[in-house]
Structure formats: C-alpha cells, structure tokens
Amino acid sequence: MKTNYFLPFLLLAMLVLSSLTAKAQMPVDAYVTTSAPVNDMVEGTGFITLADTNQVDLIELKLGSGDGLYDLFNYSFVFDQSSGLPTGCDWNRVGSKVILKLGSFPFSDVQFGMVRIKYHNGIYSDIYSFVTN
C-alpha cells in the first residue's frame, strides 16, 4: 500500500505561506486634537480605536504639517506602557480606545497623520491616514 504525503504537505505549505503574507488589522479610527496655539505651539492628543487589542506590540503615530511630512510628531508607543515616554507624552487605554498625549509641537493649520500597528509577530497593519484641521 502506497501512502500519499503530497496533499498534507501541500496543505501545510499553503497554511505557512498564507500566515506569512497575512496583513494585520489596521485601526478602526484615528484622529488628533490640539489645544489653542500659544507662542505658535500646541498640545496634541491622539485618539485611536483598535479593532482588536490582542497581540499588539506597538502603535506608531506620525503627524506632519504637509502630506507625507512627519515634522510635528513621530513616535512608536509600546502598547500599554506608560513609563519611559518622551516629555509631555502619556498613554491611556480604555478597552479598544487608546488616548495618547503627544506633548507640544509647532502649530499647523492642518495636520496630516498616519497610524499603524505592529503586532507581536512583527507584521505591521496597513496605514490608517487622516487629516485634522
């Protein structure tokens, strides 16, 4: 009797390859609010809603004064870690909603932002882009 190992091997190979190419879920929503400018500086707060908080490693948030620029804010927050943050930054999470204090940065009439999530397996989500004015 001949045993056929081809089909189980093929199924295992497809499973491994599909897990390597799978994209992680991107944030459901993200935006930034700023305080009124004082001496052309504002205080920023980021609000990010995640579809799922399991296996999240980092939340990367970038903010710029123009499309493709990240000259206002650029930092990767370690998930659920509130110590060791840059001056003025703070981490707070309630369920799947993350609230990030961004500290001070220069005032801009419009802020172009992007958020992406890095999961424990090293895979990044697609970028969630937003514009705040």
Image (spheres, helix red, strand yellow):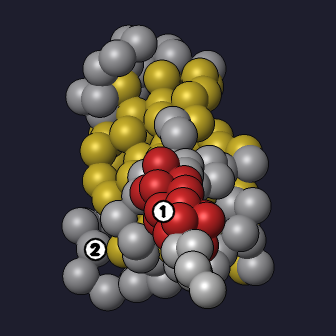
Instruction: Give the SS element for disc 1.
Output: helix
Give the residue type that dot 2 points to: Leu
Q: Give the residue number, with chain letter if any, for mark 1.
A: 13
Q: Is residue 75 visible?
A: yes
Crowd tier of the residue under label 2, counting other residues whose Cα lies within 10 Å: few below 14, some 14–19, many 20 or above:
some
94 relative to 30, above or below: below
Image location (x, y in percent) of residue 40: 33, 27
Q: Residue at x 74, y 48 (%)?
A: 28
Residue 40 image label? none
Dot 2 falls on a residue whose secondary structure is loop
- Please, is residue 82 above or below residue 102 in the view? below
Q: Nearer the viewer, residue 14 or 36?
A: 14
26, 133: nearer the viewer:
26
Residue 98 position, x and y percent, is: 63, 67
Task: Please state which amino acid type lies under the numbered disc 1.
Answer: Ala
Which quadrant: the C terminus? top right
